[in-house]
Amino acid sequence: MRRSVIGGAKRSSLFLLNQAHRSLLSPSPPPLHHHLGSSPSSSATALLLLLRRLSSSSASSPPPPNMSNPVTVQSINPKVLQCEYAVRGEIVNLAQRLQEELKANPGSLPFDEILYCNIGNPQSLGQLPITFFREVLALCDHPTILDKAETQGLFSADSIERAWQILDQIPGRATGAYSHSQGIKGLRDTIAAGIEARDGFPANPNDIFLTDGASPAVHMMMQLLISSEKDGILCPIPQYPLYSASIALHGGSLIPYYLDEETGWGLEVSELKKQLEEARSKGISVRALVVINPGNPTGQVLAEENQRDIVEFCKKEGLVLLADEVYQENIYVPEKKFHSFKKVARSMGYGDNDLCLVSFQSVSKGYHGECGKRGGYMEITGFSPEVREQIYKVASVNLCSNISGQILASLVMSPPKVGDESYESYSAEKDGILESLARRAKTLEDAFNSLEGITCNKAEGAMYLFPRIRLPEKAIKAAEAAKTAPDLFYCRHLLNATGVVVVPGSGFGQVRTCFKMLS
Amino acid sequence: MAPKGLDYEHLNENVKKVQYAVRGELYLRASELQKEGKKIIFTNVGNPHALGQKPLTFPRQVVALCQAPFLLDDPNVGLMFPADAIARAKHYLSLTSGGLGAYSDSRGIPGVRKEVADFLLRRDGYPSDPELIFLTDGASKGVMQILNTIIRGPNDGILVPVPQYPLYSAAISLFGGTLVPYYLEETANWGLDVNDLRNAVSQAQFKGITVRAMVIINPGNPTGQCLSEANLSEILRFCYQEGLVLLGDEVYQQNIYQDERPFISSKKVLMDMGPPYSKEVQLVSFHTVSKGYWGECGQRGGYFEMTNIPPKSVDEIYKVASIALSPNVPAQIFMGLMVNPLKPGDVSYEQFIRESKGILESLRKRARIMTDGFNSCRNVVCNFTEGAMYSFPQIRLPPKAIEAAKSAGKVPDVFYCLKLLEATGISTVPGSGFGQKEGVFHLRTTILPAEEDMPAIMESFKKFNDGFMEQYEDTRGYSRM
């Protein structure tokens, strides 16, 4: 079936590349009325300035201010102006205004509440946290009660034991102290063991950097890799717009590679090659490849063979493989399994000398859904000690990530085991959440497919649906008349009519109308 | 083999330029020695809980209850937690949109930002708009966000005090801007002269740099000086004249150890000045839960308040904040608790006051013990720690010591600090990590080691220092008159 893409894939790629290149242009400074500093090469000018300044210091009334440098939109960092993040963009701002209106005038809108389906924020929509994790965190936050008899009655025995174990790994049991800039060593040991248990290949705790969520780790890598717009990062389209935003913020170039909707959002190495070569021919030095597996917003889970091709490709082309694996526990189809890229690379016989790989994990997704905690890590393998030193240095400027999030990351990577007191209840909670997510994914997929003008791929994993809306010509024309992207136009109408907040597909890099919906 | 993406040669040069001595060479060496079994006293970073300061009880009770809300349903919860902690936990949970585990508004929970606004009104006497208060994962993240917004390229300069907390120099390097130093005068109690500011700006302009913002750290880090109201007015007037954004790092506002110059916020002084200043000068003020008497560094909680920043710029700053989704929620609750404290009559009030006073009184004592201790050492001169958490003694290194440092390939104060570390286990940060005048050397320690350990630590330092001075002294004179 031929795709009838509005605007065509080419336009979206141009759109994205242009975004990156716009950062080359810096805004011209606003007109200056008395600031002589604009031609500072003249020493006479500088002297005049100094004299002016000395005389003005003795003036009794305040002299007119130098308005040439205030922080206005004309004079802020153009890379900040450049970057966009649709997940919390225009539609969300509109939704917040509508929410306020509902509060002020209940009944004034055709719906009773705003339903935020724009963001993977499960606990805001009623999902409960995993009890065992919260028990341990509460005890670590307030260790004084560990000595009290009543605690035994309020907390499970294994959560008390785990809390002691964790506190013993923290110098002075001080959870309020800055830790090592990579995160508490004992917790990294636990995470490394968890990675090994998952993959069957060892992990080194010194390769792990605990961060305030996976996003800051992504930023750190972009900062390291990008020196100018000549540095390109290959990103999937559609992509989670953290990547486009981060690349823009750091002044690099996003090199898109297109996932194929017809083949369940498949990733073809031939497409990677094509985009890579095109970018290189334009003088871009392509530094890394971002792969989101399971995908966001697309939900596809890569086949192992596909992953091997990707590893091979990165090795051959000298690309850093940035593997966003935050949805590794969100897989809803029995025929697919998660394989980490590290595991795939190691099972191909590739070690630290063969491939630069950064794997990102988070406490925000999976079945734990602890978004508000800001916990996550990156595992970095295959780079030199000098580079690792630089990464450590950048991490150290922020001192460390929040301790509670660090503890949670270690719990996620080493949850209760068979035989532990909390194992049964933990399992029940986990299975309950994952089964419900799988059911909702299927229900919504079927529902979308039954609607007029809408088709929707199955969500194999992650937390989103990305249906395709075939907008009638009249709608597209109306959108153009309103100077709005067609999908944004549709999403705005949806919000105004029903209170449902979704993200237009153009926010992910596809010039077509697509939804994003938390299943 | 093809060049690889993360080859050292191809790394972002800005990253390579970054220096952050607080966790640099000395700290790494100290960690190595610690692994070898040597007892190390870490005084390199303002990290109170790591040196034995206990967390305040009440906030930990509240946050523990928020972490595990099922406790609130348990009939026995009152046996373990006081009623006001239970009430507060319920209050903060009601302000969230799904408890601690949900992303909040990217600017922070609106209810907590309102509490910050109320605090600012009480503190300064002027109303604050919660919409202009953004909570962040620590004040440092807020500083980085704002600097990244201001700095367009290498021709943008940021006025930074010398000595300074090296977050500023690191962030400016990272974002490709230019640091324009203004020197604090050690002999005038680390005072600031506005003429120096003017000169610094002129010199920068001469080099083609447009100065965009000015950083003040009040109370100072590493210097500890508290700015007077007159000083702050001068600075604000200067910023008005030059069209600079003032970045007011006020994270140590609760750490004041003298009574002549209590803390006064930049915002209050600005508002007191009235128009046109109060309506025109752009100001961003930073605060944190990491310092004061809370010392909750590990939570990563902070905020910044924007004054006179144009709405469109605020939108851009909000946009960037939203990419990170939200600051961590537990720390937001710590912030709420910090700005909205217990009142007389609350069940936990007495204990809270006792704990807080205990910490502040002890810090005041330790500031004095350390200053006096350093001043009793040979070739060491130390200004009193008026505020913050550090002591920044000047070490007058004899020429022979400087030569020995050179031969060892080390900056002189690094050489001294490494020797100090190896002899005593005291891990400090060399003054070069903060910036200092040419040929003048310092080190920074914190005043945080436990009060009962202080005499022994100062004794140990004196023994090392006086021995070092004896070893390297000769009649040729010292490093600085």
Image (spheres, helix red, strand yellow):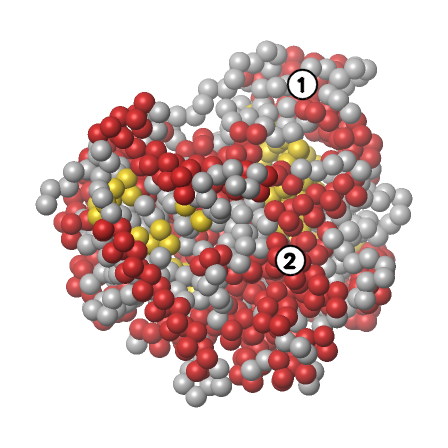
Between A233 and B89, which is closer to the camera in this rendering? B89
* Mark 1 residue element: loop
- Residue B409, image quadrant: bottom right
* Mark 2 residue element: helix
Residue farthest along the front direction in this orientation: A107
Q: Residue at x 67, y 58 (%)?
A: B91
Q: Is residue A148 left or right of residue A304?
A: right
Residue B213: image location, x then y, percent: 62, 31
- Label 1 Cα crowd, 10 Å radius (few <14 / some 14-19 / many 20+): many
Q: Is residue A274 visible?
A: yes
Which label sits on residue A65? 1
Q: Amino acid at mark 1?
A: Pro
Q: Residue at x 26, y 30 (%)?
A: A476
B387 w.r.t. B207: above or below = below
A381 w.r.t. A138: above or below = above
Residue A139: image location, x then y, percent: 61, 74
Q: Amino acid at mark 2?
A: Tyr
Residue farthest along the right direction in this orientation: B260
Which label sits on residue B92? 2
Q: Say whether mark 2 and mark 1 are on the same chain.
A: no
